[in-house]
Image (cartoon, rainbow, N blue to C red):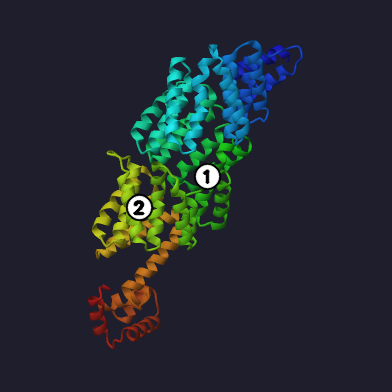
């Protein structure tokens, strides 16, 4: 193939978003000394390199920037400098990133056509302020960026500015206002109005924000759209790892834990190929599945890797500590995570704080946390958030002795989880509902709820919860039956029904000798001497 044909094929592939083909063909053309790629073509080569995870991306983008300067296209040179700075900022190379942003500021500050890049230039400053906890400065930066972007019709700047403003609103707990801004961004993304990198950024951000806001329906919708977008560009590495991590989170919620683990593994593979932003989500989701399956050591390792990205692996690690019997450590971790959390992030962490506080028998702390959670509810909460709050409040009310009120909320939460097809959380509600039923004296309903929960946990492979459920069943049995074993209680109930030892043996598939042995133990434990006295004891103590 001639170099001219390679160039033509590379440009066609770029337009068709076939990034690997575009990279290979443009690289071939670029290697020919007789062909000199123009600045825009070098920029396209750099974009293709970044999207497929090739390490040459920044170097090639630098070449494009310099070529734009030589050509006198200051606006394009400034735009390239901003994107290089943002990419380096994302990679954690803050000194180099700052240098490129400063260069872009100098070019834009010189005036002329470069002023049109002013809106995009404010985006990294806004992001720096936002992630540094300075929402006021971030809002100012994004608002100015939006105004400049609209003035110069810079769609990328407009979209990223709206995304930033929406994220601030959601962090403040104003989900409706935040998503009104973000939904407008996503209209531009799905219409193909944005360039590839801002589109990928938007997809990743909107799904993460949906999860923070407990907007399950919106998260599912955009995860499917993101997956479709990535599948249409199968050789794209950038953003694809994050897509797999988001799919893992969705699979986990729906109870498809093996699919979730495989998606997290795929996310790790893409992260290692260049999509470094996927590392946290991939490791965290892998840790979540391992924790739920009872694979404590593996979960510990996954959470450790997640923490190495700079973000705390919470509430997962705290809940792992709780499952390990280290409740005080769990409490310390969750409290530490909540110190600097914004309102939206606190709301995400509060259910774990409630669970840990109840495990430590700190009912006052659990009540404070559930009251805070209730206070964050918007006027019309999304179903998932309503279910989270109902389940948490039900758990606290149960410990406070208000079993009837607890049961009402727990059954409402279960119905919502069931409707959303979130089986694990639904099963957890059934365990609490069983305890509430038992407290109200409804043994039949309690047994039904326990059995349904055990079946769900077994189907999911929720080893930790099955162990907890068995321990709870034993403790309840001990509390209800005193010194008697479950088998001895069965024998007592049949005696109270007037059955002979032979009939009891037949019904329980035991020998008469074994039945007689059980009865002898019962008489000794209860200090009774006759079947009539045993029958009276059984009715008096609600064993039948």
Viewer-proximal residue among 54 and 527: 54
Percent across and percent down for residue 475 are 37, 69
Nearest to the observer: residue 156 or residue 501? 156
Judged left or right of residue 172, residue 277 is right
Vertical arrangement, residue 80 with respect to residue 427, above or below: above
Task: Tell me if label 1 and label 2 are in contact, CB under 8 Å.
Answer: no
Residue indicated by mark 1: 311
Residue 395 marker: none
Q: Nearer the viewer, residue 264 or 279?
A: 279
Q: CA distance from mark 1 to mark 2?
A: 23 Å
First in sequence, mark 1 or 2: give its number. 1
Whole-percent x and y of residue 305? Answer: 58, 48
Image-quadrant location for residue 489: bottom left
Circle 2 residues within 10 Å: few <14, some 14–19, many ≥20? many
The residue at 55%/33% (across/down) is 240
Image point (54%, 26%), residue name: 197
Q: Is residue 364 above or below residue 384?
A: below
From this view, report whether residue 324 is shown above or below residue 215: below
Horizontal side of 8 relative to 510 (left or right) equals right
Residue receiving disc 2: 369
Q: Image quadrant for the C terminus?
A: bottom left
**Element under disc 1:** loop
Location of residue 156 in the rendering, given as x and y in whole percent from the top left corner: 49, 22
Write the residue at 36% across / 29% down.
180
What residue is at 66 percent from the left and 13 percent from the top?
70
Q: Is residue 487 visible?
A: yes
């Amino acid at each position: 193939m001639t170099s001219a044909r390679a160039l033509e094929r590379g440009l066609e592939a770029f337009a068709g978003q076939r990034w690997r083909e575009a990279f290979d063909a443009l690289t071939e053309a670029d290697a020919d000394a007789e062909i000199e790629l123009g600045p825009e073509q070098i920029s396209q080569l750099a974009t293709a390199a970044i999207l497929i995870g090739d390490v040459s991306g920044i170097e090639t983008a630098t070449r494009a920037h310099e070529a734009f300067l030589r050509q006198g296209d200051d606006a394009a040179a400034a735009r390239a400098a901003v994107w290089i700075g943002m990419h380096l900022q994302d990679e954690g190379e803050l000194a180099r990133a700052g240098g490129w942003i400063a260069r872009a500021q100098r070019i834009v500050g010189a005036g002329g056509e470069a002023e049109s890049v002013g809106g995009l230039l404010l985006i990294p400053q806004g992001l720096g302020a936002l992630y540094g906890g300075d929402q006021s400065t971030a809002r100012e930066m994004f608002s100015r960026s939006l105004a400049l972007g609209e003035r110069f019709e810079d769609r990328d700047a407009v979209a990223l500015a709206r995304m930033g403003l929406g994220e601030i609103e959601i962090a403040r707990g104003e989900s409706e206002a935040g998503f009104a801004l973000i939904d407008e961004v996503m209209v531009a993304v799905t219409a193909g109005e944005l360039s590839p990198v801002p589109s990928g950024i938007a997809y990743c951000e909107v799904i993460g924000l949906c999860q923070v806001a407990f907007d399950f329906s919106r998260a599912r919708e955009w995860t499917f759209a993101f997956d479709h977008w990535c599948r249409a560009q199968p050789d794209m590495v950038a953003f694809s790892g994050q897509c797999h991590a988001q799919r893992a989170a969705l699979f986990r919620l729906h109870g498809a834990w093996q699919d979730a683990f495989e998606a997290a593994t795929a996310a790790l593979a893409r992260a290692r190929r260049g999509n470094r932003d996927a590392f946290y989500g991939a490791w965290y989701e892998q840790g979540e599945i391992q924790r739920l399956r009872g694979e404590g050591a593996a979960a510990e390792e996954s959470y450790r890797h997640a923490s190495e990205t700079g973000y705390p692996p919470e509430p997962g690690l705290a809940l792992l500590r709780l499952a390990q019997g280290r409740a005080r450590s769990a409490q310390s971790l969750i409290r530490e995570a909540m110190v600097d959390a914004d309102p939206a992030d606190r709301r995400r962490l509060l259910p774990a704080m409630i669970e840990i506080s109840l495990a430590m028998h700190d009912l006052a702390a659990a009540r404070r946390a559930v009251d805070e959670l209730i206070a964050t509810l918007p006027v019309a909460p999304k179903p998932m958030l309503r279910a989270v709050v109902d389940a948490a409040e039900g758990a606290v009310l149960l410990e406070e002795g208000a079993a009837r009120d607890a049961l009402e909320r727990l059954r409402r939460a279960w119905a919502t989880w069931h409707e959303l097809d979130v089986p694990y959380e639904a099963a957890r509600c059934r365990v609490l509902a069983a305890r509430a039923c038992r407290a109200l004296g409804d043994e039949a309903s309690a047994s039904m709820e326990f059995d349904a929960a055990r079946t769900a946990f077994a189907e999911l492979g929720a080893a930790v919860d099955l162990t907890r459920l068995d321990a709870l069943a034993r403790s309840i049995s001990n509390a209800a039956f005193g010194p008697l074993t479950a088998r001895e209680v069965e024998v007592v109930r049949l005696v109270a029904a007037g059955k002979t030892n032979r009939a009891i043996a037949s019904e329980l598939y035991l020998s008469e000798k074994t039945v007689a042995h059980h009865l002898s133990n019962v008489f000794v434990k209860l200090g009774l001497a006759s079947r009539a006295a045993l029958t009276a004891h059984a009715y008096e103590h609600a064993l039948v």
